[in-house]
Image: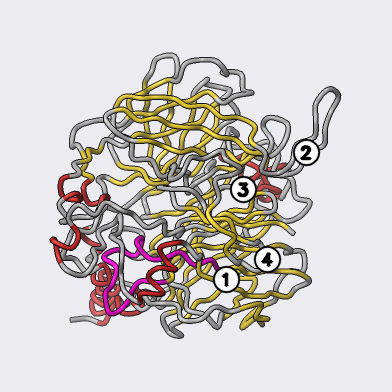
Amino acid sequence: MTAAGTAQVDAAARAAAPAYDRDDWASAFRNVGVELDGVELTTARGAIPPELRGTLYRNGPGRLERGGHWVHHPFDGDGMITALRFAGGQAQLRNRFVRTEGWLAEEQADRVLYRGVFGTQKPGGVLANAFDLRLKNIANTHVVRLGEQLLALWEAAEPHALDPDSLRTRGLSRLDGLLKPGEAFSAHPRFDPGHHGGPRMVTFGVKTGPSSTIRLLEFASADQPGTAGQASVKAGQVLADSSHRFKGFAFLHDFAITPNWAVFLQNAVAFNPTGFVLGQKGAAQCLSSKPGEAGQFWLIPREGGTQAGRQPLQIPAPEGFVFHHLNAFEDAATGELVVDSIVYPDFPSIAPGVDFRAVDFDTIPAGQLLRCRLDLAAGTARSELLEPRTCEFAMVNPARVGLEARYAWMAVTEAEQGNAPLQAIEKLDLATGERRLWSAAPRGFVSEPVMVPRPGATAGASSTQVSSAEASAAEDSAAGASAAEDSGWVLCLVWNGARCASDLVILDAASLAEVAVLELPLAVPHGLHGSWAQA
């Protein structure tokens, strides 16, 4: 064989080989054995921007094993909050478990006392689990700041309130009596940047069954001074509260907002609780997709918007399963409502008897970013592919939530095709399709990226409707509002398989150039969602 032929074979072999070691990826699944309190950090590379002032909060499972008994799925692990506080070019680290009732009881007993939604069973087999329908509020999915409270969220029950500085658990919060005991409160709120006069946290709760009820709630997310004839508003004050009933079972983790609509996607799934009741499965394992059936977009008018008082709309959705949406906006040119979502061809689940640490990624459905255009008058939807690479955890500049955005940031696979662990951060230009990539491969694995706007930058009117040539010229000259939209940083926790610990990576949001890397004295398992609270 010629040298050229050998080179071609070697290149093909490298392309076919995974860019990761499964043991590196799986090494993140461990118990966190320490709670650090205000540890000062130094950068391993680069420097922390002095303008970066605030706290990155992140939630995820920190306890995955107890008494030798492992959870069946990491989503059943106990919630642990990690906080990285930035000021004056310095950083400080703090982490603490959420002291839920179940966590405290299991800590005292030193054994598993509860079943998990995603298949974790108590020791003792089917007889020990049958007809025990109690669920532990594990507070492990998201963490957000609302006024003077930090809320640890788990979507099947009430939030837990924490001290924003010390992370100490204040207790279960029913938001001044707004929630009933055990009432579901979403783990995926959306932050309205000010479509109705001031910033709001928009969230929901869902009660499922043959018919499902969505409770839509809006809270002031910052203090707002009073105006003529109106009293001042305090952060955390409820501003809107409405309930809406729809036919069919609803599995809803995320939703999207525009100035006038709250957008939900009812996935085409069925729920048969028999296996859960009989102690054979977790509740989430009782979900199954309905091949050939379409989901439904449920569109609820927001109070204060131009559609307030109108009945909710239902529009058939294209096939696919959605956990997370990127964003939604109202297209003034076409009159359509546009929803960008990460769509899976089927519901991804881990069957009983499968070790999640040894899962075969080739057998798991891969998510891709799709845009769906809803014609509200005709009641129809059409979709197009925005990003073919496997991706998850996407976001836009917080100032563009509910509006047309130019840029998106997301976690993606290193390989352009096929499913694999998430090892890179991508910036996608939604107007031109241009992509920039920062990779942690081969031994690094990324979590959800959080885009933090540069103080003083204003993400003004989007330029997604200009031509590609015009967009390129605007980018080259760094002029216009679109240049401000990607002014800031992307923060991301990365599992470093070489160190068996976590790194915090700071990237320039525009170029994805590496600004700084902080090697944390802490091993944070692969987790879920986080948020930024500006100082």
Q: Mark 1 points at which residue?
A: 505
Q: Where is residue 115 in the image (x, y as percent from the top left)?
A: 28, 60
Q: Name the residue under label 3.
A: 397
> 244 above or below 24?
above
Q: Quadrant where the C terminus lies?
A: bottom right
- Identify the amino acid type marked 2: Gln
Do callouts 1 and 2 mark residues in contact (Cβ within 8 Å)?
no
First in residue order: circle 4 vs circle 2 = 4
CA neighbours of label 2 inside 10 A, class few (<14), some (14 to 19), many (20+): some
Residue 254 located left or right of residue 64 = right
Question: In front: mark 1 or mark 2?
Answer: 2
Which residue does the image show at 83% across and 22% down from the upper left? 229
First in residue order: circle 2 vs circle 3 = 2
First in residue order: circle 1 vs circle 3 = 3
Q: Name the residue under label 2.
A: 224
Q: Where is residue 388 in the image (x, y as percent from the top left)?
A: 36, 50
Q: Is mark 3 on a helix, strand or loop?
A: loop
